[in-house]
Amino acid sequence: MSEVLQGVRVLEVASWTFVPAAGAVLSDWGADVIKVEHPATGDPQRGLVTSGLVPRAAGGANFMIEQPNRGKRSVGLDIGTDEGRELLYRLVERSDVFLTNFLPGTRRRLRIEVEDIRARNPGIVYVRGHGQGVRGPDAEKGGYDGASYWARGGIANALTPPGAAYPVTQRPGFGDLAGGMTIAGAISAALFRRQRDGVGSIVDISLLGVAMWMLSPDIVASKLFEGMATPSFNRASSPNPLVNVYKTKDGRFLTLIMLEADKYWPDLCQNIGRPELVDDPRFADAATRFENRAECVRLLDETFASQTLAEWRERLANVKGVWAPVQTAREIHDDPQVAANGYLPQVEVGDGESLALVANPVQFDEAPAALRRAPEHGEHTEEVLLEMGISWEEIAAYKESAAIL
């Protein structure tokens, strides 16, 4: 991949996945991302393995650290001390972007608010990740994607089937990773603005805002149709039977997304072995299929249930409309499109072990991403300080005072 951000330095004072995921993307794009971690505890996400909340994979890989932290350099630095804070400020002077998700009260206590950082580097791009946003009654409160994004942002409600006993639970990092990609894009725009206008932006992104963006059609429509009886369809009465999920003989599922149904209906019927349906007057066009949608879905249910997913993969290989198998996370590793596009590169994570990490979805100059492993806690402390012109004697003194790892 072309290192489009080569020469850009990002100073990351953040933990967990939401904001660090942005740092990982920027690293993929060539930026030098320095991750500042407390010398004793590090990013608290490192501890999820030892606490048992995240299983340690074969070979000892902590995948919940590797995925959002690959390619960074880790500096163990206690910014709660005067010595550690001064070292941070010196790093600020050498950086283009300051990236944090620390809460407002913590930022004030540690003196890493906008005015503190800008005092040492007026043109720096200052970036904050929030749970609920920078203003309002909950601006000072924390947030995780399971709460601010999934629950409060309406995603859980939208994806939970009617009548379910409990809302659907999100997968790990679901909103965090979408939010991290959003932050990375925002930082790129801010860097462009700084190059063009000489202005260092203050950038704010919240998990609540990201959720609302992703659910925006539902949110906009909910107000427009408030108090009205809006049409409601279940799977068996889909208004377009060619936009639906169907079960196969072996209990698997495939999804049809053929929005221009009249364009694809004849070809689909031929490929599923039901050519007689092409001329069936009940299904002659989109309007008649809508009127007879329950029967159309029933016939398609019957047809797709007659063969396995593997058989349908072969039969539908050349169908003109869009369809996809409902795959498991494990099956994605073996998807030929994933391999061909370099979406799941192998990364050496230590002791000769390799781990497949998911590349960010952006590719430059038709080249897949080349990822590097996440750093060990404080792995690059001495390296970075030496680059700053700090002597070994000074480094030893900082270690003695516990300002660094």
Image: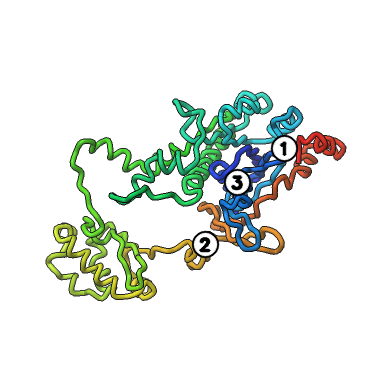
At a point 70% along the width and 47% down the height, the residue shown is 377
Q: Quadrant of residue 221?
A: top left
Q: Nearer the viewer, residue 379 or 121?
A: 379
Task: Count residues near mark 3 (Cα–Cα under 10 Å), then give few for <14, some for 14-19, many for 20+.
Answer: some
Residue drawn at x 24%, y 68% is 300
> Tag 3: residue type?
Gln
Give left or right: position of 225 versus 147. Answer: left
Q: Which residue is mark 3?
A: 45
Quadrant (top left/top right/bottom left/bottom right) for the C terminus: top right
For mark 1, does the 10 Å Cα neighbourhood hold few (<14), some (14 to 19), or many (20 or more) residues? many
Residue 283 is tagged as: none
Q: Earlier in the sequence, mark 1 or mark 2?
A: 1
Identity of the residue furthest to the right in this view: 393
SS for callout 2: helix
Q: Of label 1 and label 3, which has the lower sequence position?
A: 3
The Cα–Cα distance between marks 2 and 3, rounded to whole angstroms, is 30 Å
Quadrant of image for the N terminus: bottom right
Which of discs 2 and 3 lies nearer the camera? The answer is 3
Q: Which residue is mark 2?
A: 341
Amino acid carrying mark 1 in the image: Leu
